Image (cartoon, rainbow, N blue to C red):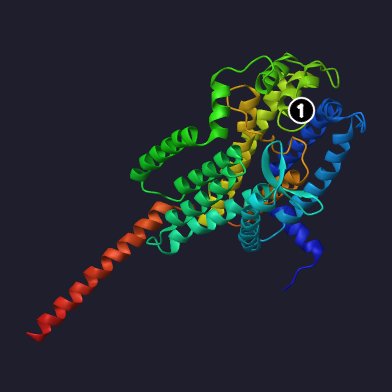
Amino acid sequence: MRLDKRSQLRIWWREIDRVLLVMILLLMAIGTVAVAAASPASARRLSTSAVKLDDLYFYWLHLRWQFLGILTMLAVSMAPRDWARRGGIVLCAVMLAALILVPFVGSEVNGAKRWLRFGISLQPSEFLKPAYAITMAWILSWRVRDPRLPVIAIATGLMGLIVALLMMQPDFGSAILYVGCWAVLVLLSGIDIRRIGLLAGAGIAGIVATYLLYDNARHRIDAFLGGGTAYDQVDLARRTLMGGGWTGSGLWLGTRKLSLPEAHTDYIFSVIGEEFGLLICALVVVLYLAIIARVLVRLVNEENLFTILSASGLIALIGGQAFINILVNLQLFPSKGMTLPLVSYGGSSTIALCLTVGLMLAMTRRNPYLSRERFDLMAALAREEGAKEAGPRESSRRITRGKGGRR
């Protein structure tokens, strides 16, 4: 029986994690105020003699993108899990094809070719992130049906292809994020404990090889280890962050942000520190930690492996990107050109992040009136192994009994 719109909304409101939704909207509200604080610095920096941007130019644009992003988030969160899974797999295929096109027909900005222009700028790697997490979870969940399937090899091959395409742009920061998501999902999928050491060794070898063979990564790491200069953007970001003390200088009263590049995107956390203080920065960090913890707690009693993996992959992408950005602003990580999720100004990237959050909300929806048994992957695999061992033994018994009968 098909439900009407009102009934569907009632079911959605009953099943959605309202605490998680409120925390996400609170983080976006902080982002709105932060972009208002950072907009004058970026507008003045990007103004020319021919074109003078209004101080709140990026703020008004951000409001429009946030409105579209919230609509996207809420619409996607209403999708049933099967639809979310199918949509994620289709989106992964489309964005992977677009990512392959980027080196050939992409638009170059600041020395990186990451965008496709079809009237608007589209960065395929941003929209690929949530689809990648969904597709990875789908592939790795095949193990429940047949433990003999080479799901780790298939997932690793997909990850390797995407990382290679990102390195060609170059986009070293996103490559790290994709590898991190893959590692989280592989570990959660029930990999043999003996292989974890091999994965760790392969990761270290990959970092060393990247440093030796990949100029973009080597230059960033060298600049980070060298400590930078007073005019280095990461050092400027740290100085701006610390400039407001515990309580900040006040909205639009900060001065260090005026010399900070990309104040409204990559270094908005530093602007928050200068104008609103380190206490608000701590609140932002606590909010991210609370969102991550809330999703993981929500998954404790989940019995479906695909749901566990997909929601974990989506929150790993959001949390990983957030803490890489924060560490860069604290001068504890090399510059990556990565925004602060749900806080920084963004166009299509805001829509992509809201799509990610919408999928995460869809995956963590749960009927509060249904009791669930906790899913145990290792027990399921043990049962499968026991069934496979019991099969040959039962066959040999039947053969033995048959021989005895013939005697």
Q: Is residue 231 positioned above or below 403 on the image?
A: above
Please give the name of the residue rendered at 78% of the width and 31% of the height, measured from the top-left corner. 264
- Residue in front for this viewpoint, 367 or 325: 325
Residue 250 spot, x, y in % from top left? 83, 18
Residue 282 spot, x, y in % from top left? 67, 24
Number of numbered discs visible in the structure rendering: 1
269 lies left or right of 93:
right
- Image quarter of the N terminus: bottom right
3 lies left or right of 335:
right
Look at the image and tell me whether residue 217 can be seen.
yes
Circle 1 Cα neighbour tier, 10 Å, few/some/many (<14 / 14–19 / ≥20): many
**Residue at the left extreme of this rendering:** 407
**Residue at the bottom extreme of this rendering:** 406
- Residue in front for this viewpoint, 132 or 44: 44
Please give the name of the residue rendered at 10% of the width and 86% of the height, measured from the top-left corner. 406
Residue 328 spot, x, y in % from top left? 63, 27
Would you identify the image quadrant in which residue 92 lies?
bottom right
Disc 1 residue type (three-letter):
Ala
Secondary element at tag 1: loop
- Image quarter of the C terminus: bottom left
Would you identify the image quadrant in which residue 284 lies?
top right
- Residue in front for this viewpoint, 139 or 349: 349
Residue at mark 1: 263
2 lies left or right of 252:
left
Q: Is residue 386 positioned above or below 223 on the image?
A: below
Look at the image and tell me whether residue 299 can be seen.
no
Please give the name of the residue rendered at 44% of the width and 52% of the height, measured from the top-left corner. 376
Residue 366 spot, x, y in % from top left? 63, 54
